Amino acid sequence: MEPVTQPPDPETSTADPESEAIPRTVVLVIGVLLAAAFVMILNETVMGVALPRLMEDLEISAATGQWLTTAFMLTMAVVIPTTGLILKRFTTRAVFLASMTLFTAGTALAAAAPGFPVLLVGRIVQAAGTAVMIPLLITTVLIFVPAARRGAIMGLISIVISVAPAIGPTFSGLILSELSWRWMFLFVLPVAVVALVVGSLKISNITTPSEARFDLVSIALSAIAFGGLVYGLSSIGEAAEGDTPLPPALPIVVGALALLAFTARQVHLQRQDGDRQPLLDLRPFRNRAFTVGLVMLLVSMGALFGTLILLPIFLQNVQDLSTLETGLVLLPGGLVMGLIAPLSGRLYDRLGPRPLVVPGAFVVAAALAAMQLLETDSPTGLAIAVHMVLSAGLGLLMTPLMTSSLGSLPADLYSHGSAILNTLQQLAGAAGTALFITVMTRSATSAAEGGTEPIAAQASGIHDAFLCGAVLALVAAALSFLIRRPQAPAAAPEAGGGAGQDTDEAVPAPLH
């Protein structure tokens, strides 16, 4: 059964289902979800800058401290694939309350942690709540926001997905310059509590759940597949520096094999008529518009997270900036992306995706190539300017790509398309980080062995990594000419058939 809306309250909604108006009940739900998701995703990237302070206060090694980020990513990678079925099985209110309660509890636990083990558990609980929120937000928008208004709302989601991680290091840098690491969680906790209370009072059940059973075999295979791949990719950088408990190839191979088994299992369940549904419906991949847009999104996310790793390394290790100064250098780029993302959403509603995606893709490639202009004695303003250009290109890309790729799916695949996108974004972030760090490390090592000074060798390695990213971005730019505005199909395809065509956007569920 597809999610459908409950009859709206006449005092809070007077929208005609064929109009472009968004019912006030839906606006309220989306507003609460946006605020909650922003705080959650912001929290995902605060640990990198805080690691030196945590190593000192908790008396742990860098490899141990890195698990505060790795465990968060692993939990996200394991939980997100289940969200497609979760969003069909449970109501909007129930999913929100579970997600926000987990995040709030994890934040409180981390703030009060007496030592590393409890802090690690708190991060894992936070991640479990975070993993559900973004798919819930995206699916709610796809179902209840008319197509003509969807770009503008998806622009706000782009702020959450791309801007929050970008300003996370600035947030933690500002706090750590004056306060202890616990305040990274203490500042977030009241916001999480307010969002939980407001949501519990205001969010109603705007969907009707279906009867769907979870396939335990699929859950186990998904955890091994995506957990293994994210862990393996995340540890490539550590391995390049000679500091990893396992060879990265081992979890990557295990994850890849489990992914093949997981895919076969989902295809098998899709062809059955029993009550067990696939954990992650793979039919969205039959839609060319979805697949092309997804590939471009993944390249963009890889470039974003790779840059968020390498640029701070360059600023701190090569140009000798402090943690706080590094965070402030990155802040203007995050603000630019925050300004452009909603603007590109509104322009998408008027112009479609291609006039935004094509120039955005080439701007990203040019900005990554321009990173090679950064030298040891380059002015800080140059780093700020290049990062702002990169952020502007990503801002032009993210909203139109998300809107057109997910909007090209029939309504019964919205939740699964969102789960696929968010799962693979985790992989793309890990892969982008692994690629940039590996190229940097090997290139810097080679330069140092050739007699180059250590700082200059590291700068050379960073340049090579950004050049590699620019080449990948050019591949995405070539794909950008295939992006087009989705069109509404006559009907959603039945399970197991009809999705092989290049279908486009489905009409949202009726609002009465």
Image: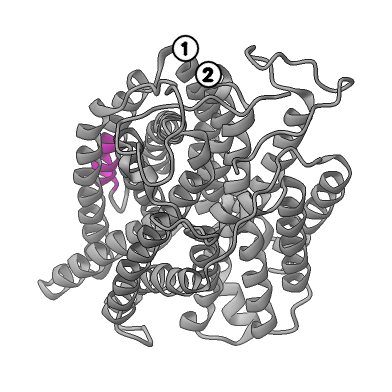
Secondary structure mostly seen in the magenta stretch: helix
Decide whether residue 371 is among the magenta residues: yes
Quick one: SS at disc 2? helix
Quarter of the figure with residue 498: top left
The kind of residue on which mark 1 rests is Arg
Image mark for residue 350: 1
- In the rendered image, residue 310, in percent from the top left (x then y), is placed at 36, 57
Q: Are marks 2 and 1 in contact (CB under 8 Å)?
A: yes
Quick one: SS at disc 1? helix
Q: Can residue 300 be seen in this view?
A: no
Decide whether residue 138 is among the magenta residues: no
**Which span of residues is magenta-colored?**
365-374
Most foreground residue, 492 or 291 = 492
Q: Name the residue under label 2.
A: 346
How far apart are the two marked residues, 2 and 1, measured between alpha carbons? 7 Å
- Quadrant, the C terminus: top right
Circle 1 Cα neighbour tier, 10 Å, few/some/many (<14 / 14–19 / ≥20): few
Image mark for residue 407: none
The kind of residue on which mark 2 rests is Arg
Quarter of the figure with residue 331: top right
- In the rendered image, residue 263, in percent from the top left (x then y), is placed at 34, 62
Q: In this view, does 356 lie above or below 134?
A: above
- In the rendered image, residue 38, in percent from the top left (x then y), is placed at 64, 46
- Quadrant, the N terminus: top right
Q: Which residue is drawn at 45% across and 32% down?
A: 395
Q: Residue at x 77, y 67 (%)?
A: 105
Q: In this view, does 384 lie above or below 184?
A: above
